Amino acid sequence: MNQVKKYIKIIFGCLLISVGVNFFIVPSRLIASGTMGIANLLYYDYNLNIPILLAIINFWTLWLIYMIYDTKGLKKYFLPSILIPIFIYLTSFIHLSLINEVEKLLLAIFGGMIIGYGYAFLYKEGYKVGAINIIEDVFNDLNDKNTRWISRGFDIFLIFLSFTSYGLEQILYSLIVIVIIRYLTTKASIGISDSKAFYIITEKEKEVRKFIMDELKYDFTVFDVEGGYSKNQNKIIMSVIPTKDYFRLKEGIKLIDKNAFISITDNYEVINKNNEFEKEN
């Protein structure tokens, strides 16, 4: 059943990307990010078929990488590389006349959002799209370094090409599309921070612990630590709470001990979390 849900999400993600391209990006002559962007440019300038271009680019990239660098990880690219060109081809026969009446700014925003959410569905299931992502991941495996500059540099190159061909207005709209897509795919990769992790050192440890347990109803963990320079023995109270209670805990600690050391970090995922501390009656 889980496998069925997984493939439904992958198919839905590919369909979203195709709808975003055909209904929002192409009618406005905008540029999406990555391989899709270069296919957009070639279509606008030379009327080359977008799904065929994507299929050719993806196929040859996969084949070359397989010949140079054999890796089982490439299988996560095959299904989207096949489905997206097919869905773009099928949805290209659907024409919405009302789209022509919508302002280009709205088309750019909604097009970027739909494509970005499509990528997000794929990323959350461990799949990726496009030749640029393939090259980026392979270089990352070979060099063990951050290679995000490859996709970002390619997007800058696309924007430059768009500017030389279509002018400043078009580049700004296309930039909106690319930024939205990048933002949503990044959030899909690292998650969305829905909680905060507090690390607290205070001289009023009992009062802070009581406040977290009795007032906010959350659990915590206490660590014994030693100052690196002073060698003083201290305790760190660590508590992970939902973002909605972020200000309550921060301001509550400051009221208890204005000199307390507080470090707060975004928490993207908590596994086997125990959100609430249940008091025994």
Image (spheres, helix red, strand yellow):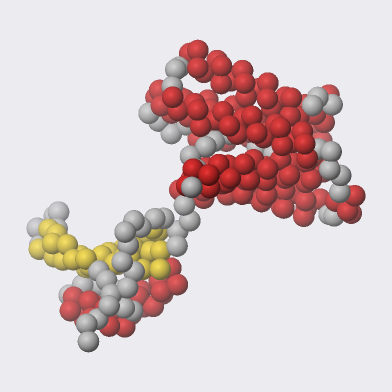
Does residue 260 appear to the left or right of 7 in the view shown? left
Q: How many numbered badges does the structure rendering display? A: 0
Residue shown at 55% from the left, 41% from the top = 7
Give percent across and percent down for residue 222. Answer: 18, 66
56 versus 258 height, above or below:
above
Would you say residue 47 is visible in this rendering?
Answer: yes
Does residue 218 appear to the left or right of 80 in the view shown? left
Give percent across and percent down for residue 78. Answer: 56, 28
Give percent across and percent down for residue 11. Answer: 62, 41
Viewer-proximal residue among 72 and 223 = 72
Residue shown at 77% from the left, 51% from the top = 107
242 versus 164 height, above or below:
below
Residue shown at 81% from the left, 38% from the top = 92
Quarter containing the C terminus: bottom left
167 versus 213 height, above or below:
above
Q: Residue furthest front?
A: 1
Viewer-proximal residue among 201 and 224 = 224
Quarter of the image where one finds residue 162: top right
Residue shown at 25% from the left, 69% from the top = 220
Does residue 276 appear to the left or right of 89 in the view shown? left
Viewer-proximal residue among 239 and 262 = 239
Give percent across and percent down for residue 210. Answer: 23, 81
Would you say residue 168 is visible in this rendering?
Answer: no
Q: Residue furthest bottom?
A: 281
